Image: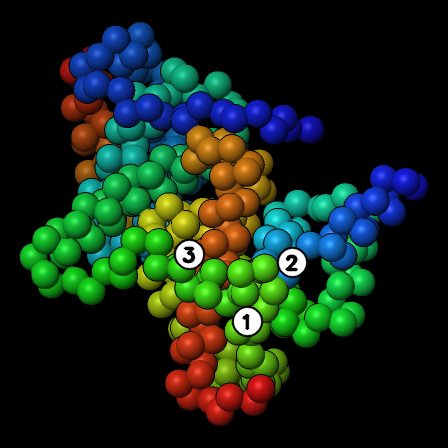
Amino acid sequence: MIGFVRDVFRVLGMPCREHTALFSKQLDEPLPPGIAAGLRIHILYCGGCKKFRAQIRRLRDLAGAIGQELDSGESMPKTVRDGVLRRAADQSKKI
Amino acid sequence: MTDDTIQPPPVPDPPVNGAAVRRSEPSVVPVEQWLAEHGDILWRFVLGRTRSREVAEEVVQETILAAMQGYANFAGRSSERTWLLGIAAHKIADHLRAERRRAAGSGAGNTPPRDADKAEFHAMFTAKGMWARPPREWGLDAGSTTEKAEMLAALRHCIDALPPAQAEAVWLRDLLNIPAGEVCKALGISPTNLWSRMHRARAALRACVEKSIGMRKEDTR
């Protein structure tokens, strides 16, 4: 509990530049509960950080949509596949 | 549970006829299996990054050759697919750096100055780290397919404009949705390094997309 409260106040005392780094990190891994709570409180009164957080989340979702398009993209052409196998065979001979 | 220690790069680009090559047993390197299971995603990834079929073909070949050489050291630290994509990411970054150097040398390119993204990011804040130029309201209709298409086009352009090391991290993490721990192993970087790259990249993408939108929209701030 003490750690939680300490983390909340630590976040509330940080400048916004550091909050932006935490918003990004939060997209990659869960933050400790006190840090996450501090960020939630901060965006209640900081419009700049609230927009930053929403916008990088939106861009991450759009990036995911671009990635999903890859699933239905072009298969590796046979010529490329054959070229890879040829060079792989050449390399094996050298070994 | 993965550990957070720094992993060595998975494929250290060994010499072509070096000892590491001789140690590995060529008959057990499953190149055909790699191509069958991961060939398509590898091709789409490399083609998406390089935007050139000729270059993509070369990069895919180099990726597989490097994977053959490094296979003895692979040891399953990440999934085979992530490992191959990580090697490809390094090869793509090497290629793009060389291409940008050539363009800069010939005066043909308009490569932004090194660390321009960092300078731009810091300009958004006061010396004390508070907002000097806070993000604008984008004022977009989230349900509009036209606006989504515009945003996607802007984002693609902005990702291409990122420094190669940031772009490779964004591709693996946000486009291909590979867990952060796996991306670290694939790129041979520490979690701290990945967070730093991702933060710089996301801040740069946000600013770049905002500029792109700003060309078409009124500032509603």
Check contact, mark 1 vs mark 2: CB within 8 A. Answer: no
CB within 8 Å, label 3 to label 1: no
x and y percent of residue B212 in the render? 41, 78
Looking at the rendered structure, the kind of residue marked 2 is: Pro
Q: Residue at x 29, y 39 (%)?
A: B91
**Mark 2 burial class by Cα count in 10 Å: few <14, some 14-19, many 20+:** some
Q: Kindly identify which residue carries mark 3.
A: B118
- Residue B56, x across and y down, in percent: 25, 49
Report x, y in % for residue B195.
Answer: 54, 45
B24 or B162: nearer the eye?
B162
Decide if residue A87 is in sight here.
yes
Q: Residue under mark 3: which chain is it in?
A: B
A23 above or below B37?
Answer: below
Badge number at residue B209: none
Instruction: Label 1: state its secondary structure.
Output: loop
Residue highlighted by disc 2:
A15
- Label whose residue precedes the other's in the sequence (3 or 1): 3
